[in-house]
């Protein structure tokens, strides 16, 4: 088993809160410059920039996992990682069918840009992506599992949009195998308090700006750097 540096929670310019410099080429090349081996693109309630980042990642020697950060009806953020683009698009269709039709106000939230592998804008999404869906935590977990995705609660140490801050606990019946903690100094306290000793803890950047993409300091141990090997080590 080899060690691979990861960052499995990165936003592109499709997320309105993401900087417009978060283009496919910029993300892939910054990940390369920072020494990362594998990243995941996890925009809010959509995965339309994954394909372009994957193409750029292939040129940079960085594996790119398709992903999406779904906001539940409880305003909990959950990250879903997929084995293929087809699986990601299937989940996206389900999520968008439960996303309220609220027109984005780019002057307030930012533009929602879909780009190709040359960083050219191919579409601008009009429906606001950073809002809660009508799907519960249980709905998102179940749908992701049916597709064969890996799903975990995002930034459980944050005071907003986290499963702990919003629900007060992590439902044991969901049996998460992974959870994300941003602040490493809080890991031991949170693991003990919420009985996560058997849960693999990930430390991701949740980057919305290029400079916030993780450094080469967090590692997965996998047999290879292909998508299947990374999924095998996550589950």
Image (cartoon, helix red, strand yellow):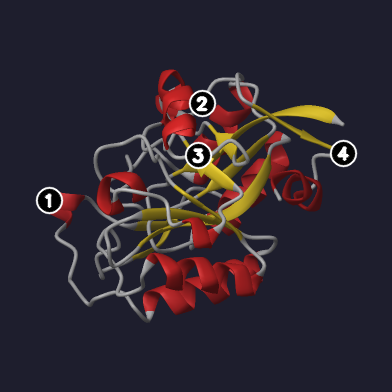
Residue where numbered disc 2 is placed? 214
Closer to the chain start, of discs 4 and 2, is 2
Nearer to the camera, 57 or 70: 70
Q: Nearer the viewer, mark 4 or mark 2?
A: 4
Q: Nearer the viewer, mark 1 or mark 2?
A: 2
Q: Secondary structure at mark 3?
A: loop
Q: Residues within 10 Å of mark 2 (few under 14, many from 20)?
A: many
Closer to the chain start, of discs 3 and 1, is 1
> Where in the figure is residue 63, as x and y percent of width and height?
70, 42
Nearer to the camera, 204 or 163: 163
Q: Nearer the viewer, mark 2 or mark 3?
A: 3
- Residue drawn 69% across and 35% down? 60
**Which image quarter holds the N terminus?**
top right
Q: Nearer the viewer, mark 3 or mark 1?
A: 3
> Where in the figure is residue 47, as x and y percent of width and height?
49, 61
Checking the image for residue 108, the label placed there is: 1
Q: Quadrant of residue 178?
A: top right
> Where in the figure is residue 45, as x and y percent of width and height?
39, 63
Residue where numbered disc 4 is placed? 223
Spatial CA span between label 3 and label 1: 40 Å
């Amino acid at each position: 088993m080899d060690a691979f540096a990861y960052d499995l929670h990165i936003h592109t310019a499709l997320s309105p809160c993401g900087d417009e410099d978060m283009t496919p080429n910029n993300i892939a090349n910054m990940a390369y410059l920072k020494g990362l081996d594998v990243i995941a693109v996890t925009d809010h309630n959509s995965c339309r920039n994954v394909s372009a980042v994957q193409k750029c990642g292939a040129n940079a020697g960085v594996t790119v996992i398709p992903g999406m950060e779904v906001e539940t009806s409880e305003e909990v953020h959950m990250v879903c990682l997929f084995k293929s683009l087809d699986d990601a698009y299937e989940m996206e269709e389900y999520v968008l069918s439960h996303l309220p039709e609220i027109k984005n106000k780019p002057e307030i939230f930012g533009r929602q840009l879909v780009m190709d592998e040359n960083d050219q804008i191919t579409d601008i999404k009009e429906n606001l992506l950073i809002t809660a869906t009508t799907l519960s935590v249980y709905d998102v977990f179940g749908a992701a599992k049916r597709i064969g995705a890996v799903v975990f609660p995002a930034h459980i140490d944050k005071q907003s949009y986290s499963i702990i801050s919003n629900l007060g606990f992590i439902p044991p019946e969901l049996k998460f195998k992974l959870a994300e903690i941003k602040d490493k100094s809080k890991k031991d306290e949170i693991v003990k308090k919420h009985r996560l000793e058997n849960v693999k803890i990930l430390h991701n950047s949740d980057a919305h700006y290029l400079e916030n993409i993780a450094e080469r300091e967090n590692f997965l141990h996998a047999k290879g750097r292909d998508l299947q090997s990374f999924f095998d080590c996550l589950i």
